[in-house]
Image (spheres, rainbow, N blue to C red):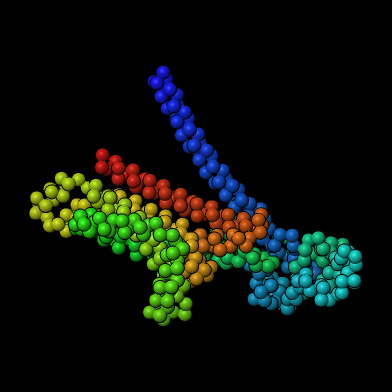
Amino acid sequence: MMKRLRHITEILVQSLFALSGSVTGLAILLIVVFLFKEGFGLFQNPDIEKGYALCLHISNPVERLQSKQVKAIFDSEITNWRDVGGRDEAIRLFRFDEIFSLYPEEALGEDYALLPQKLGEIIEQNPTIIAFLPERYLPTTNKAIKTLPAKSISPLDFFGGREWMPAATPAPQFGTLPLILGTLWVSIFAILIALPLGLGVAVYMSELAGERARKLLKPAIELLAGIPSVVYGFFGLTVIVPLLQETLHLPVGETALAGSLILAIMALPTIITLAEDAMRNTPQAMREASLALGATHWQTIYKVIIPYAASGISAAVVLGIGRAIGETMAVLMVTGNAAVIPRSLLEPVRTIPATIAAELGEAPMGGTHYQSLFLLGCILFIITMLVSISAEVISKKSHNKEI
């Protein structure tokens, strides 16, 4: 009876574990599907603000404008039609709100029924005009007016664009190149800072430190890994940022260098712990053989132990990179959040996680801005997945080497 009850209990526990694994796997799959579905929906939207159109006089020879050109026109960076393939004439801008300053509301009829007619008259009387109008008020019956065709946002515009201004009117800019480069820029320099420091501490703890020192250092390093990122952010904002600004005589201290230093500190526990474990797993026989052949302690460390633990150290570096790439709050607080292509560590930058955290609450659900942030999440997911796969491959290589 007891054996049968134990057997039933084991089956129930196994079934519970299997169900838990299935639910977890299904949840992850649904999250990934939802993420990519929302993100790639961006490419089905026009490059002009949804629900609006650009109208020109029929005599204007311009037949198409790129999103960048539209933004430059409405920002008054382009002021002559000649610069976009038209005649040598000054551009007259007209935004929809201007109609209410030209006509009293009673002149527009009940429920603005006469609004399309009045808009048509304004465009007809100004051959050099470009009007940004809601689609429901377009003067479609006026033959003196033409509407510029809008194209869909392309992957090239998204991944190769150099401007990130998703709230710009009338042509939002979704260029992620500054965000991708900013993320890689900060993360790579963080690893370049953290790697020698982490490797040095790992060597000391594994090969040089006494038992008492190791027992003190190990919990302290593990404690660093448990500190919330917002605390690191406050530390960077109050200590590192002013220090960099005063020492390097910078106009602002919120720079890529500040972000790299914070991320380096945050990546150190991962690198130190994994690298130390890899070194301590070096067989004692290899150490003794090296010393027996006349090698010094230091020669044994850098010619025997470190090469043997190279795969484990590489895995530690890769996981440290993963920690740096995915960090949000600390980077958001110290990097300046300027969506520009970085040319120096002493300039403000913006990373992908910081962009998502800063803008998701402001983006209207289902809009192009909202979808673009989900697509940024897709990019971050792919980068993180590649980093995780690399760490897994390196760890398996290390395990096979030990066998």
Left or right placement of residue 215 versus residue 82 in this view: left
Residue 156 visible in the displayed image: no
Left or right placement of residue 166 versus residue 318 in this view: right
Q: Quadrant of the C terminus?
A: top left
Query: Is 144 located above or below residue 326 in the figure?
Result: below
- The residue at 75%/68% (across/down) is 132
Across and down, in percent, residue 193 comes to 34, 65
- Name the residue nearer the viewer: 185 or 211: 211
Query: Is 309 located above or below residue 345 in the figure?
Result: above
Residue 48 visible in the displayed image: yes
- The residue at 75%/76% (across/down) is 92
- The residue at 40%/73% (across/down) is 239
- Name the residue nearer the viewer: 31 or 289: 31
Q: Total of numbered circles in the picture?
A: 0
Query: Is 7 located above or below residue 140 in the figure?
Result: above
- The residue at 75%/63% (across/down) is 53
Task: Find the residue positioned furthest to the top.
Answer: 1
Q: In the rendered image, which quarter is residue 82 located in?
A: bottom right
Across and down, in percent, residue 131 comes to 76, 69
Task: Find the residue positioned furthest to the front.
Answer: 1
Q: Quadrant of the N terminus?
A: top left
Across and down, in percent, residue 312 comes to 30, 50
Across and down, in percent, residue 83 comes to 66, 74
Left or right placement of residue 362 versus residue 266 in this view: right
